[in-house]
Amino acid sequence: MPTIGFTFYDGYYTAISRDGSGLSSFKAQQPWSGTLEYILNQINEPIFILDLKKIKLDNKNDAKWLLEEFLCFRSVGATGGIENEFATKKVPECI
């Protein structure tokens, strides 16, 4: 079964408030240089699909960083308003 994850560079998102008041809108924390969102934003494509399964099958050295390195990227989940929206993990293990 295919799994789809998404990320974004900036804007707002809707999530459950930590104070128990239900759904709220939250301003996304700005990515900094070196985060996955920052790197992908540099491509300057408004919408694109990154097929991690295909990247793995192609087994090209110049793309291994995306699959094998620990990268800092947005990891919000269902709850918003957290102090640091970014975590350092391996991307394929989270999607």
Image (cartoon, rainbow, N blue to C red):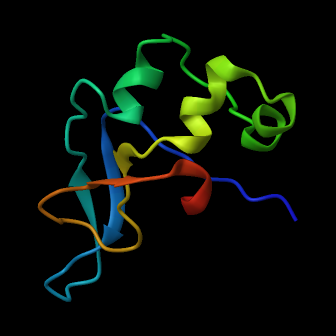
Residue appearing at x 32%, y 34% in the figure: 35
Residue appearing at x 60%, y 25% in the figure: 47
Q: Could you tell me residue 49's position as x and y percent?
A: 70, 31
Is residue 25 visible from the viewing direction of this image?
yes
Q: Place residue 84 in its image quadrant.
A: bottom left
Q: Could you tell me residue 39's position as x and y percent?
A: 41, 22
Can you say which quadrant of the picture contains the C terminus?
bottom right
Is residue 95 visible from the viewing direction of this image?
no
Q: Residue furthest bottom?
A: 20
Can you say which quadrant of the picture contains the N terminus?
bottom right
* 73 vs 39: above or below: below
* 25 vs 24: above or below: above
* 71 vs 44: above or below: below
**Which of these two is toward me, 91 or 40?**
91
* 69 vs 64: above or below: below
**Which of these two is toward me, 17 or 62?**
62
**Which of these two is toward me, 90 or 38?**
90
Q: Could you tell me residue 59's position as x and y percent?
A: 80, 30
Number of marks in the rendered image: 0
Residue appearing at x 18%, y 65% in the figure: 81
Residue appearing at x 61%, y 41% in the figure: 67
Q: Could you tell me residue 12's position as x and y percent?
A: 30, 46
Residue 58 left/right relative to 91: right
